[in-house]
């Protein structure tokens, strides 16, 4: 498969032991009115109020997983809405915003490297960046600083 030239975030690929991930995900809440957009494939982290937010690159916060979509009652159309991204600034007419997150700490994800990736780069730890897509290698990664594995708690 040829490398993709556009940014696509993290895509669930398999489990660390080689078994299929089978689309497992859990529900979390996004605070009503949260202003930042979250796209499918973005990392999310928990807050002390019980909600999740988009995790930005190069932070020490433990992430809870990879955002896979959301559900809310659209304030404009008054209709139940499922979307693979959260546009930001939504305050639903009823209820809250439900985020669907792939949160298995043993999940392996496919992502695009932001620089040339050589064989000597295998088995190393890297920080996340939020750069735009590039023509570099697609690589398989696991989240090391995972909320359910690191034991660091909520910052």
Image (spheres, rainbow, N blue to C red):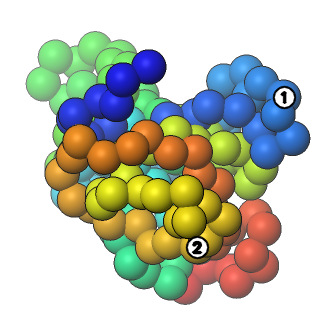
Quarter in which the C terminus is drawn: bottom right
Residue 45 visible to an observer of this rendering: yes
Front residue of 150 and 122: 122
Residue at 62% over, 31% down: 13
Quarter in which the N terminus is drawn: top left
The relative height of residue 21 versus residue 29 in the rendered view (above or below) is: above
* Residue depth check, mark 1 versus mark 2: number of the one nearer the observer: 2
Residue 31 horizontal side relative to residue 101, left or right: left
Q: Residues within 10 Å of mark 2 (few under 14, many from 20)?
A: few
Residue at the disc numbered 2: 125
Residue at 41% over, 67% down: 128
Callout 1–callout 2 Cβ contact below 8 Å: no
Front residue of 34 and 77: 34
Front residue of 140 and 147: 140
Real-space Cα separation, disc 1 to disc 2, in angstroms: 23 Å
The relative height of residue 72 versus residue 66 in the rendered view (above or below) is: above
Residue 51 visible to an observer of this rendering: no
Q: Residues within 10 Å of mark 1 (few under 14, many from 20)?
A: few
Residue at the disc numbered 1: 19
Mark toward the start of the polypeptide (1 vs 2): 1
Residue 87 x %, y %: 20, 40
Q: Residue furthest front?
A: 119
Residue 113 x %, y %: 37, 53
Quadrant in the picture for residue 140: top right
The relative height of residue 92 versus residue 55 in the rendered view (above or below) is: above
Q: Please, what secondary structure does the residue beneath circle 1 have?
A: loop
Residue 130 x %, y %: 27, 61
Residue 54 horizontal side relative to residue 7, left or right: right
């Amino acid at each position: 498969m040829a490398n993709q030239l556009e940014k696509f975030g993290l895509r669930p690929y398999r489990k660390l032991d080689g078994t299929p991930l089978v689309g497992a995900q859990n529900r979390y809440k996004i605070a009503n009115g949260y202003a930042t957009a979250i796209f499918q494939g973005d990392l999310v982290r928990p807050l002390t109020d019980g909600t999740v937010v988009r995790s930005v690159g190069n932070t020490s916060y433990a992430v809870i997983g990879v955002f896979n979509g959301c559900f809310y009652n659209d304030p404009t159309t008054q209709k139940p809405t499922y979307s693979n991204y959260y546009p930001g600034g939504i305050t639903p007419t009823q209820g809250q915003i439900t985020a669907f997150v792939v949160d298995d700490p043993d999940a392996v994800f496919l992502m695009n490297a932001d620089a040339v990736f050589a064989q000597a780069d295998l088995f190393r730890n890297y920080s996340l960046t939020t750069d735009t897509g590039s023509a570099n290698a697609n690589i398989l990664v696991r989240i090391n600083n995972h909320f359910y594995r690191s034991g660091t708690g909520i910052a």
